[in-house]
Structure formats: structure tokens, C-alpha cells
Image (cartoon, rainbow, N blue to C red):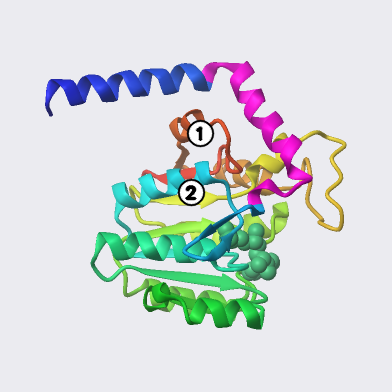
Amino acid sequence: MHPEVKKFLEEKNKNIEVQGKNEELVSLGLKFLADTASLKYSYNFTWMGRPIIALPQDMLAMQEIIWETKPDLIIETGVAHGGSIVYYASLLELIGGDGLVLGIDIDIRKYNRDLIESHPMMNRIKLLEGSSVSEDIFSQVEEIASKKKRIMVCLDSNHTHDHVLQELELYAKLTSVDCYCVVFDTVVEDMPKDWDWGIRNWGVGNNPKTAVRDFLSRNDDFIVDKMIDSKLLISVAPDGYLKRIS
Ligand SMILES: C[S@@+](CC[C@H](N)C(=O)[O-])C[C@H]1O[C@@H](n2cnc3c(N)ncnc32)[C@H](O)[C@@H]1O
């Protein structure tokens, strides 16, 4: 590696470590998310025309992961309008090869399905409709995964502890070594305790982060990639970027 490139990377990584340890900056990131949540800030963006319910920061981290790990299958639970699956598909298209995105949702509304199925990235997408934790859906996922070599998993469906834990028990093992299983909306645990989650049945103490903690307490194959949290500061997935190490 050229010494200048090495110097650039070392300086960047050092700064990331320092900012990740800066409690004031970390809490500023959380405050930004809490203060913009009532305006649904994470609903503000699109990718290639499809609404993507995610933060730009997390999506840039996903791009870095996908480029670095080059998965040939990305499984995502939680499709909604299709923005994230179209985004991952477009990255696989740019990388080349035969990469596929498998999107699973319990309720793919017709107007969303029509727009996803007519999207230019659809040749890299397969949709499955049903609960991510149902036997029928998971056996279809296993069948598709059995034909692929490098698998990445993204969990972004129902955000209750029990559901995410069930998803982790089923899907995490499909993740290839050195690839990632990303659990979204772990940030729910870091929001104010008296937060009003409306009709949603998750909240502090019952959310993807509590499921990740539970899962990791019994599983040594994954580590939390803290460098990603430190890099982003503003993220819906703190402690949710799980790297498979064995
Ligand atoms: C946060 S949205 C997904 C957002 C999408 N990943 C994006 O970034 O644009 C959550 C989705 O999960 C779906 N969902 C809820 N429970 C589910 C389940 N048991 N299995 C699969 N999908 C589920 C909902 O229908 C909803 O479309």
C-alpha cells in the first residue's frame, strides 16, 4: 500500500475511534434521531425512485460493507416500499456477477409490488410474501441460499424482541463467515424511556437491541462491529452491525 494511502487510512481510523468514544457526540447523534423522529426523518429519502425507510448514514455504511464483502445473496426481511432492496440490488448490479437480493415481507401492498416489479433493478430481486419466521417462507429462503456462496442478512421487519430473536436464530446462521448480519432499529433501546411508540408494540426493553444482546450471549460466531457505530454516530442500528467471524 502506498505510504500516503496508509497514512490517510490510519488518520481516518484514529479519528473514528476518538469520535466513537466521545460521549457528547454519541448523545448528540441520538438526540438528532429523537428530535426528528416525530417528523419521520427516516422516511424522507428515495433510492432510484423507491422510498427507502432508512438513514443516509446507514445506507452509506451498507454500501461500504457490500463493496468490501461482495455478497452474492443479500437477504432482507422487511421490504415496505422496496427502497432498500432496490438500493442493494443496484450495488450488486454495479459490482457485476450474479448477485441477488431476496426481499421478504408479510404484506407487500399491490401498489408497492407493481412499482418494485417494474423497476429496472428487478432482474436482481426476488420477493417472498409471508412472515419471515414462518416455516414455509424460511424453507424457500434456505433453498435459494443453498445455491449461493456469500450471504449477507439484513433484518428490518417487526422490531419486537421476540420476533427479532426468532429471526436471528433462523437467519444469522445463513450469514457467510466475514460477511454481515445487520439488525436495524436497535436504536429503539436508546430512545427516551417515556417515548410514545403509538400502536407499535416495541419500545425500550423490547426491541432489536435487546434481541441482539440475548442472541450474542449464546453465540460466539458474531461480533458487533463497533467501528461502524463510531463512524456513523447517526444510525438506527447501533450494535446492530454484526460481523460473522467463525
Ligand atoms: C421498516 S419497514 C422495512 C423498510 C425497508 N427495509 C426499507 O429500508 O425501506 C418494515 C416492514 O416489515 C414488514 N413486516 C412486519 N412484520 C413482518 C414479518 N413478521 N415478516 C416479514 N415482514 C414483516 C412490514 O410489513 C413492513 O413493510
Q: Please give the name of the residue rendered at 71% of the width and 56% of the height, measured from the top-left corner.
A: 162
- N-term-proximal mark, 2 vs 1: 2
Q: Residue 27 occupies which quadrant of the picture?
A: top right
Q: Is residue 197 left or right of residue 42?
A: right
Q: Do the residues labelled 2 and 1 touch (CB within 8 Å)?
A: no
State which region is magenta. 21-42
| Label 1: element kind | helix
Ligand 1 neighbours mark 2 (CB distance < 8 Å): no
Asked whether residue 9 is in view, the answer is: yes
Q: Please give the name of the residue rendered at 53% of the width and 18% of the height, measured from the top-left corner.
A: 21
| Image location of residue 188, percent across then percent down | 71, 42
Name the residue beneath numbered marker 2: 59
Q: Main secondary structure of the magenta part?
A: helix
Q: Foreground residue, 8 or 171?
A: 8
| Image location of residue 68, percent across then percent down | 30, 47
Crowd tier of the residue under label 2, counting other residues whose Cα lies within 10 Å: few below 14, some 14–19, many 20 or above:
some
| Residue 22 drawn above or below residue 74 | above
Callout 1 amino acid: Leu
User: Mark 2 and mark 1: span between their CA atoms?
Assistant: 10 Å
Magenta stretch holds residue 130:
no
| Image location of residue 183, percent across then percent down | 56, 50
Crowd tier of the residue under label 1, counting other residues whose Cα lies within 10 Å: few below 14, some 14–19, many 20 or above:
many
Q: Foreground residue, 123 or 150?
A: 123
Q: Which mark is residue 125?
A: none
Ligand 1 neighbours mark 1 (CB distance < 8 Å): no
Q: Foreground residue, 95 or 142?
A: 95
Name the residue beneath numbered marker 1: 232
| Image location of residue 109, percent across then percent down | 67, 79
Quadrant for ligand 1? Answer: bottom right
Q: Residue 81 occupies which quadrant of the picture?
A: bottom right
